Amino acid sequence: MGEERQEEKLSAMARIEPLTDKRVREFLRLARIGRLATSDRAGIPHNIPLCFWFDEDDRFYFVIDQKPKRLTARGLKRMRNIQVNPQVALLIDHYEEQWNALAYVLVHGEAAQVEDTSEYLLALRNLRDKYPQYRTMTLSFESNPMVRIEAVSVHVWGERFKAALKPVEA
């Protein structure tokens, strides 16, 4: 039984191994926008652009900020979807007319609202460092939910990642 768990752990680590590549990390650090895909209980997809922070390990964070929205923070479709189905995909991509410069990182993961105040403040500080617009917003633990996405599998594509594109054996 212990050997089987060890194999599962190694397999899980291999599925997120691209996140350890310095080129992938740099790409994620510099990326300005990601696209979050969620789905509701019936499997109906929902996709939205968002600002995110990658913690240089295996977690991605986004906050429900003060940009105009039709619903309150927890009433947003993405938040309702995450509550009933935490399996999400986050796509971070780069487009240029020179197609040899195209690239993307596709993260499949499990999303959850951040409940720990220290974790919330750390992620918020890093989001504010990355996005100056957040510095002028009054964002709080009580009013602006933060979501953590823990990577379960990662797929990278593009010439810039060639050495990071080793096949993963399941």
Image (cartoon, rainbow, N blue to C red):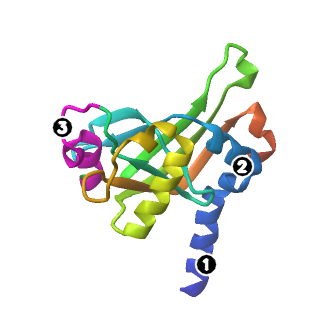
Foreground disc of the pair 3, 1: 3
In the drawing, what numbered circle is on residue 71?
A: 3
Instruction: Using the image, determine if residue 113 lies above or below residue 3.
Output: above
Check disc 2 and report its element: helix, strand or loop: loop
Tell me which numbered mark, 3 or 1, is placed earlier along the sequence: 1
Residue 119 in sight from this viewpoint? yes
Q: Residue at x 18, y 37 (%)?
A: 71
CA separation in Å, label 2 and label 3: 42 Å
Across and down, in percent, residue 148 comes to: 43, 57
Residue under numbered circle 1: 6
Which residue is the extreme one toward the right? 163
Q: Is residue 79 magenta?
A: yes
Quadrant assignment for the C terminus: bottom right
Q: Amino acid at mark 3?
A: Leu
Crowd tier of the residue under label 1, counting other residues whose Cα lies within 10 Å: few below 14, some 14–19, many 20 or above:
few
Which residue is the extreme one toward the front? 136
Q: Amino acid at mark 1?
A: Gln
Seen in the image, is 23 located left or right of residue 139?
A: right
User: Which of the 4 image quadrants contains residue 26?
Assistant: top right
CA separation in Å, label 3 and label 1: 44 Å
Q: Amino acid at mark 2?
A: Pro
Across and down, in percent, residue 106 comes to: 55, 41
